[in-house]
Amino acid sequence: MAVAFDEMKGTDGEIRPAYSELANWLNGVRPDVLEYRRKEAELLFRRIGITFAVYGEADAQERLIPFDVIPRILSALEWETLSKGLEQRVKAINAYLRDIYGRREILKAGIVPEDLVFQNPVFRPEMNGQKVPHDVYVHIAGIDIVRVDADTFYVLEDNARTPSGVSYMLENREIMMRLFPELFSRHSVAPVENYPDELLATLKSLAPDSAPGDPNVVLLTPGVYNSAYYEHSFLADKLGIDLVEGRDLFVKAGIVYMRTTQGPKRVDVIYRRVDDDYLDPLMFRPDSALGVAGIMSAYQAGNVTLSNAVGTGIADDKAIYSYMPEILKFYLGEEPILKNVPTWRCREPEHLAYVLDHLEELVVKEVHGSGGYGMLIGPMADKAQVAAFRAKLKLDPKGFIAQPTLALSTCPTCVEAGVAPRHVDLRPFVLTGRDRIRIVPGGLTRVAMKEGSLVVNSSQGGGTKDTWVLGK
């Protein structure tokens, strides 16, 4: 595997301009001070109550995501490129969804194979021909970005269903401002704290035409036992909207209402953190206690906006991801600003043959996998793991894709031994409203805390960092 690009020191060991102030500061700060601040940050997170649970574990205890106190820094120019690429990508994703549930021109053109759509478990035939408010399907997207050198950013994954992590982006910034005011004073850092205002403005702009002047927006959560419940309650609080569960809502005459102490109150926009399957027991899983009976009929009548729209999973599937450059060119007639990672589709015999011959060099992922589970990182796997994946691939080649093992960039990170480089990715959040696309500068930087590890997911021991975008 190639040597990883160091975002602070570059390829020649010289400090890159965006990091010059941070490097000076790090040279002057004692290791025990950094460690003290790290413990202080952990204490603050515990006090605030930011925790998550990992499903499937025997004890499933709530735990903290490790927080790194050294920020990741991007220059204004780097962010400008990223921002343009993100906007372009999300426009293409929305055009694709509109087409797949509408005229299906991309299938007629033979660019995306029909079976990848129609046999996909997250394809929702109920959405065929369904008009969605203002033709926007993905209102909130979390696009995972990795970097391999000074100029090259790759999209690793598109999250078009219910992307999470924005609460960490906001809390990380708040804690850094409390703990390191002197470091902030040395930099011109673009703000992220206006994200809740931008999100609320986006959601209100997407209200159906039948909604009153000031639309009523609520956040629908599966409840306290969901691993991201902290984020749901945090966001509802920051947006100043009601946090509701399925039992708090009901549908009457094609309109969604919320039960309140003053009587029923109409709901116009639902920022839902409940998966499609559980949304409406009359249309999807009849055993769901998390959704609202009849909510899809209100949606189909155009009386409520569901954010994100139902059926968006067909755009963030890992097999569909491999067609994104062609999808983007088809709908926008443009070359992608952000690259796709080269991808072998194991469903194709030649691709499968190559993957089986090169398993020790590749990353193999389940098409519907997430959270860093169900994947093989060839260069770091032992012979038994490689053999097990070889058997899986032969049994169900359609269920997997493979990619080269990228040398993800590294950032300076506070670890037990002091400050050391660790691999990172970035999840910026892209908001698409009726009027425009909004992207707050930065996002959630996830960091692989273990030396040499490429897995940044919190469920796999990864941590987070504050992401600073410098002003021009």
Image: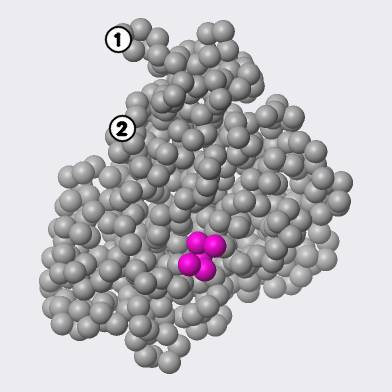
Q: Position of residue 438 (x, y in %)?
A: 47, 50
Which residue is depicted at the point 29% across and 82% down?
20
Q: Is residue 245 above or below residue 308?
A: above
**Which of the image's four quarters has the N terminus?**
bottom right
Q: In the image, is 75 to the left or to the right of 329?
A: left
Is label 1 in a helix, a strand or a loop? loop
Which residue is depicted at the point 40% across and 49% down?
165
Q: Nearer the viewer, residue 141 or 119?
A: 141
Q: Which mark is residue 261?
A: 1
Q: Nearer the viewer, residue 108 or 470?
A: 470
Which residue is depicted at the point 40% across and 14% down?
265
Q: Residues within 10 Å of mark 1 (few under 14, many from 20)?
A: few
Q: Callout 2, which amino acid?
A: Gly
Residue 38 in view (yes/no): yes
Q: Is residue 410 above or below residue 431?
A: below
Residue 421 part of the magenta-drawn span: no
Residue 119 in view (yes/no): no
Q: Which residue is mark 2?
A: 240
